[in-house]
């Protein structure tokens, strides 16, 4: 018989930490903690397989489930010494979701389940605390009605506010037992009024209702959005954990908190966390009350008055610190922990590997190696390559003037400037229009994640370092400042104020997620420093990777940046990008609009020294590393004049009339320029263009060899080849230019001529194309466009929808479509190497900097990937991980 339910706590532990796929992260780790002898309230986990079964079978459960749950529940009752639904001594439970990976705040939770009109009396008597019992009951009715029965929680908030007004009090804490009792009655009546049926009194009905709600929450919109953003497959499903309640709200010797065993923001080895005395767990995370610090040192550093846990509960704090150390040594990683103290007794509610910033991930990985807990390989595998992006984010220029507006917690690092937006939908819309926005909210909720994703940065008025905004922003790598105490946000009026100043929707602000400061206006930012831990990890990564990593760089500036990031050469220098600089564009336009070869040559003669100068600089910066220069590629219309004054400039330079020029420009118009007169087709029809470029390359190479003594081996790359004939013809012309230049200068350099594989035909015919090529570079941008038949320029309109509908798991222009486009890459590589075993193979589409695509390139056996300068470190790490994963 299938085992659908696993027990933990109270001396048993049927699961283990490595059973996350079955038990979810939370369930597996609760079982593991129980087996380590840590104090875990007893509970049961319903497996993720039940979730899958539930959705495969018209939302019904396996027939054996009820009996298995009841048997496990009986074990909990025995361990706690209380019975579910017992009037005198009731067991209360929490019901929580728990997928394989944590999805903070995305799915549903119900606490205090098992209370009804009778058991609440038992709880009041046993706890000797009627206020607590009635408060728990009304919380339960509120949560259950909201989560399970779909009655919006504002109904209940209203009733609380009305009662407080009647009584003339401001705070919930001023309400007494009888007030909560009255509210519990009103809450039930409200639920009945909305639903037309009474609030369930049968505890079993409550339990199955909550279990159903958790499984149901796997498919609610915000959970789907979260999964899409985090590449979590629908098929994983969630587990459900039913666990005996422990209470942090039983008075001043009770508390609840969350903690990290190291600082998740910068990685420092220090306990880090927050707690609240006399509160339930959700109060800390929800940011309703401002939590207090865990350690004395953190409290003092922040200049806060409220006692730290280390000071207010020294005994329990010491136990907790021991648990932290034990868990770190056991899991060999930084842990994120939830705990509750009930009447001075410590209970562990959760542990998991803690989410951290890239900076912290690096420091922790490097420190753990130095502490002897993990080896270098493990460290390399611990850091998510995509997260390195965060480290490559700008910081504020310390010398730039600043105009202080408010200050909050440094919740997620990086500096960002943008316009103030108060609404998540609007943030998304404006970001789509290319605006940099800062999403400013009182606090964020899971409904806001699409706006947070679209924003450059996030600012909230409420909430701690573990609030929703902070956790989600760190995961996304968005700079975030949370809990800015002086900030008042009036969303309706579209303004926010702090310390007597006002900022309107649409005004610029700058946030610094590393310090928590917020400034009026856009403050200048600086590029990051990449030494220390980053450099150490990169050295380890470089030991393991097989792929080489080059960069796509067109300017001396990019080239220099890329070298600093560890690029081992240039995989793609798009020469056309050089054509837009300064005055050159006029000469480029003359070249395009020339009526005959003589005129074109005149224009090309102007461009030659400029191109040569660029190549000299690039060869010098790369100092002997390989440089692949691609000859002119893009559709010519990109260079055509558009504005009147642009036509006038070119007409003047060419000595022709503006009208004539306009007519000629109109002649060059194409309906599908991406599939038109571009790439090697330009080289075939206008031989003098490629000849000029080849000459510039050879002259520059000779100049650099003689002035620096470095070796320079230019790799000349012909774009958009479909047939071997095109390549053979163009190769012959390049060779002829080489001979001419070498004869003129009396010196030679070695060079290579290769091609891009960016059309399906080229991939299919790679076997014969290889006869004329010294190397291939897969241009997967165009190859994606032409294989799937979707336009690089226009696909944005529907691709979003395609990804939402899961037609594509991810945007194929971002991460290579491994089955389709990838198959052509594989085939092209095989056929090319069948002709020429040593054929050098690389990739230079945007995919070269995407970790999943890099792993694919490793598996296919390419020699190198090439990507934009800022993604070079990401590719290096991804390549190492690919090699280590085998
Ligand atoms: C490609 O098509 O993948 C490529 C690198 O070339 P471009 O993006 O310049 O067309
Ligand atoms: Mg291309």
Image: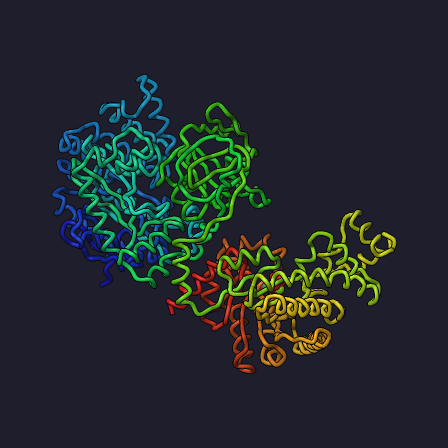
Q: Relative to 427, does residue 640 appear above or below in the rendering?
A: below
Give coordinates of residue 710: x percent, y percent: 57, 68
Give coordinates of residue 545: x percent, y percent: 42, 67
Instruction: Determine which quarter of the picture holds residue 131.
Output: top left
Q: Which residue is painted at 27% across and 25% down in the image? A: 173
Foreground residue, 698 or 510? 698
Q: Relative to 158, does residue 167 appear above or below in the rendering?
A: above
Instruction: Determine which quarter of the picture holds residue 155.
Output: top left
| Count of number-bearing discs | 0
Asked if residue 568 lies left or right of residue 331, the reply is right
Answer with the quadrant where ligand 2 appears in the image.
bottom right
Give coordinates of residue 26: x percent, y percent: 28, 51
The answer to whether residue 785 shows anywhere in this view is no
Q: Relative to 559, does residue 292 appear above or below in the rendering?
A: above
Asked if residue 524 lies left or right of residue 84, the reply is right
Asked if residue 285 lies left or right of residue 66, the reply is right
Foreground residue, 371 or 259? 371
Which quadrant would the N terminus be assigned to in this image? bottom left
The answer to whether residue 318 shows anywhere in this view is yes
């Amino acid at each position: 018989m299938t085992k659908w339910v696993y027990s933990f706590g109270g001396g048993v532990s049927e699961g283990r930490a490595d059973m996350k796929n079955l038990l979810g992260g939370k369930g597996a780790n609760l079982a593991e903690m129980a087996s380590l002898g840590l104090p875990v309230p007893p509970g049961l986990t319903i497996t993720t397989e039940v979730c899958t079964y539930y959705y495969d079978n018209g939302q019904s459960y396996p027939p054996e489930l009820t009996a298995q749950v009841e048997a496990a529940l009986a074990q909990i009752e025995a361990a706690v010494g209380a019975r579910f639904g017992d009037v005198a001594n009731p067991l209360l439970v929490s019901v929580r979701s728990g997928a394989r990976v944590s999805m903070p705040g995305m799915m549903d939770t119900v606490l205090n389940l098992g209370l009804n009109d009778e058991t609440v009396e038992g709880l009041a008597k046993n706890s000797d605390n009627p206020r607590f019992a009635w408060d728990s009951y009304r919380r339960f009715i509120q949560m259950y009605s909201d989560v399970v029965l779909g009655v919006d929680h504002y109904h209940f908030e209203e009733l609380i506010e009305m009662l407080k007004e009647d009584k003339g009090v401001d705070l919930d804490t001023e309400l007494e037992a009888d007030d909560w009792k009255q509210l519990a009655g009103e809450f039930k009546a409200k639920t009945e009024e909305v639903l037309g049926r009474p609030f369930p009194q049968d505890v079993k009905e409550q339990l199955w209702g909550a279990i159903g709600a958790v499984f149901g929450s796997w498919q609610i919109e915000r959970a789907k959005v979260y999964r899409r953003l985090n590449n979590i497959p629908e098929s994983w499903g969630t587990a459900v954990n039913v666990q005996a309640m422990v209470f942090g709200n039983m008075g001043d010797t009770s508390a609840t908190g969350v903690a990290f065993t190291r600082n998740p923001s910068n990685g420092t080895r220090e306990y880090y966390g927050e707690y609240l005395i006399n509160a339930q767990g959700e109060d800390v995370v929800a940011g309703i009350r401002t939590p207090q610090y865990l350690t004395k040192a953190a409290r003092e550093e922040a200049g806060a008055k409220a006692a730290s846990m280390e000071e207010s509960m020294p005994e329990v704090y010491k136990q907790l610190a021991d648990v932290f150390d034990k868990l770190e040594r056991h899991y060999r990683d930084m842990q994120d922990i939830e705990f509750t103290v009930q009447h001075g007794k410590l209970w562990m509610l959760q542990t998991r590997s803690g989410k951290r910033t890239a900076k912290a991930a690096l420091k922790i990985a490097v420190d753990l190696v130095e502490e002897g807990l993990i080896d270098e390989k493990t460290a390399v595998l611990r850091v998510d390559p995509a997260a390195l992006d965060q480290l490559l984010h700008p910081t504020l220029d310390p010398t730039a003037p600043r105009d202080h507006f408010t200050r909050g917690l440094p919740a997620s690092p990086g500096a960002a400037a943008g316009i103030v937006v108060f609404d998540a939908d609007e943030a998304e819309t404006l970001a789509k229009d290319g605006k940099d926005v800062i999403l400013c909210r009182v606090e964020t909720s899971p409904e806001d994640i699409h706006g947070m994703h679209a924003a450059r940065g996030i600012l909230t008025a409420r909430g701690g370092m573990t609030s929703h905004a902070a956790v989600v922003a760190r995961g996304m790598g968005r700079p975030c400042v949370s809990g800015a105490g002086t900030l008042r946000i009036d969303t309706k009026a579209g303004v926010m104020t702090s310390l007597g100043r006002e900022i309107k929707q649409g005004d610029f602000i700058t946030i610094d997620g590393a310090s928590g400061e917020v400034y009026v206006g856009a403050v200048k930012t600086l590029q990051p420093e990449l030494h220390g831990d980053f450099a150490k990890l990169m050295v380890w990564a470089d030991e393991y990777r097989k792929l080489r990593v080059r960069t796509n760089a067109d300017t001396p500036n990019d080239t220099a940046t890329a070298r600093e990031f560890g690029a081992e050469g240039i995989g793609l220098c798009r020469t056309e990008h050089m054509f837009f600089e300064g005055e050159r564009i006029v000469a480029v336009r003359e070249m395009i609009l020339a009526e005959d070869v003589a005129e074109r040559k005149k224009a090309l003669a102007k461009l030659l020294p400029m191109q040569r100068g660029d190549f000299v600089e690039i060869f010098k910066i790369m100092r002997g590393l390989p440089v692949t220069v691609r000859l002119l590629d893009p559709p010519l219309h990109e260079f055509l004049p558009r504005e009147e004054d642009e036509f006038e400039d070119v007409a003047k330079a060419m000595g022709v009339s503006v009208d004539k020029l306009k007519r000629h420009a109109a002649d060059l118009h194409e309906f599908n320029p991406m599939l038109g007169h571009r790439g090697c087709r330009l080289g075939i029809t206008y031989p003098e263009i490629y000849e000029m470029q080849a000459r510039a390359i050879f002259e520059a190479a000779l100049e650099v060899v003689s002035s620096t003594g470095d070796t320079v081996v230019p790799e000349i790359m012909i774009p958009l080849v479909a047939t071997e004939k095109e390549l053979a013809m163009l190769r012959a012309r390049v060779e002829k230019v080489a001979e001419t230049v070498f004869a003129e200068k009396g010196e030679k350099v070695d060079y290579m001529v290769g091609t891009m594989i960016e059309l399906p035909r080229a991939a299919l015919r790679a076997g014969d194309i290889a006869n004329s090529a010294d190397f291939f570079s897969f241009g997967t941008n165009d190859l994606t466009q032409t294989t799937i038949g979707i336009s690089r320029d226009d696909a944005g309109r529907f691709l979003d929808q395609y990804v939402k509908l899961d037609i594509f798991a991810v945007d194929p222009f971002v991460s290579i479509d491994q089955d389709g486009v990838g198959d052509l890459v594989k085939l092209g590589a095989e056929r090319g190497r069948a002709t020429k075993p040593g054929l050098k193979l690389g990739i230079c589409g945007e995919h070269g900097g995407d970790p999943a695509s890099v792993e694919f390139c490793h598996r296919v056996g390419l020699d190198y990937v090439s990507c934009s300068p800022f993604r070079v470190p990401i590719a290096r790490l991804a390549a190492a991980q690919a090699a280590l994963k085998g």
